[in-house]
Image (cartoon, helix red, strand yellow):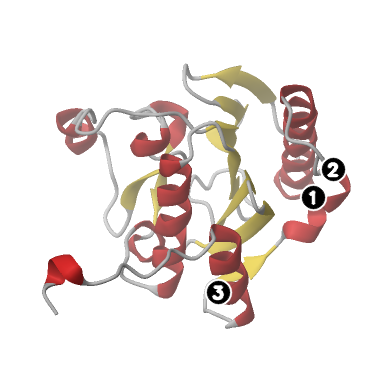
């Protein structure tokens, strides 16, 4: 059958994709959905989502203080997403907000290439450019190639979540960066990706390895 005549396989709902990855016991990922269930809004109206976002920030701050000790946490916007940032350690704790429509081929690749990196890591985006994230600043972190690229099961799931958010602008999502018990370390040991998908809320923790 010619390629043009082949029926396209229906895409799997993103929540099913996440659930199957968790159930399969893929290395480097684990579920954390239950932490947020008491706060997940029944209706995804603007007010309910805004209250949920406040709860997400509170949970992220509490978790961070538990391991980081002394910190100076501040919230601000980078112009695209909201940020929870530790001024003392100079590192991003949380990026969150609604995904946005972004025109294709608008990423500043020259800026991305020139931004300081580190051997063995990619210049990862907490919120990808395609879903409205900005280049540099608090949106960048040192991310392992295994989770930033489609070269591992964990990386494929990370990218699938990004792709879904790109195709569904207006979806509330967050990325929480998890650090070891050391205020001097700027490389997260794990990243938590959560989102209020149309099919339901899901949260996945990815090892940064």
Asked whether the residues under the numbered discs 1 and 2 touch, taking CB atoms below 8 Å apart as contact, a structural biologist would say: yes
Residue 52 percent coordinates (x, y): 77, 34
Question: Mark 2 vs mark 3: which is more N-terminal?
Answer: 3
In the image, farthest residue toward the right:
38
User: Residue, x 32% and y 65% (percent of image)?
Assistant: 150
Q: Is residue 113 above or below residue 32?
A: above
Q: Is residue 96 left or right of residue 147?
A: right
Q: Which of these two is toward me, 77 or 143?
A: 77
Task: Give the residue pinned by disc 1.
Answer: 36
Crowding at mark 1 (Cα within 10 Å: few <14, some 14-19, many 20+): some
Task: Give the residue pinned by disc 3.
Answer: 21
User: Residue, x 47% and y 16% (percent of image)?
Assistant: 79
Q: Which of these two is toward me, 77 or 9?
A: 9
Disc 3 is placed on an element classified as helix
Task: Give the residue pinned by disc 2.
Answer: 39
Residue 95 percent coordinates (x, y): 56, 35
Question: Mark 3 vs mark 1: which is more N-terminal?
Answer: 3
Asked whether the viewer can see residue 209, the reply is no
Q: Is residue 153 left or right of residue 102?
A: right
């Amino acid at each position: 059958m010619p390629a043009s005549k082949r029926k396209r396989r229906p895409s799997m709902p993103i929540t099913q994709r996440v659930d199957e990855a968790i159930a399969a016991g893929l290395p480097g990922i684990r579920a954390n959905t239950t932490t947020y269930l008491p706060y997940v809004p029944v209706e995804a109206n603007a007010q309910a989502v805004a209250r949920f976002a406040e709860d997400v920030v509170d949970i992220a701050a509490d978790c961070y203080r538990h391991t980081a000790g002394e910190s100076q946490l501040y919230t601000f916007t980078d112009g695209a997403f909201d940020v929870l940032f530790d001024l003392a350690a100079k590192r991003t704790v949380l990026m969150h907000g609604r995904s946005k429509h972004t025109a294709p081929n608008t990423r500043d690749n020259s800026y991305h290439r020139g931004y300081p990196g580190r051997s063995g890591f990619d210049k990862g985006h907490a919120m990808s450019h395609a879903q409205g994230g900005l280049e540099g600043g608090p949106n960048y972190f040192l991310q392992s190639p295994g989770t930033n690229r489609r070269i591992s099961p964990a990386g494929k799931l990370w990218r699938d979540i990004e792709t879904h958010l790109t195709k569904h602008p207006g979806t509330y999502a967050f990325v929480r960066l998890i650090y070891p018990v050391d205020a001097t370390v700027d490389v997260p040991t794990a990243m938590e990706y959560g989102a209020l998908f149309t099919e339901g809320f899901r949260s996945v923790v990815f090892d940064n390895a």
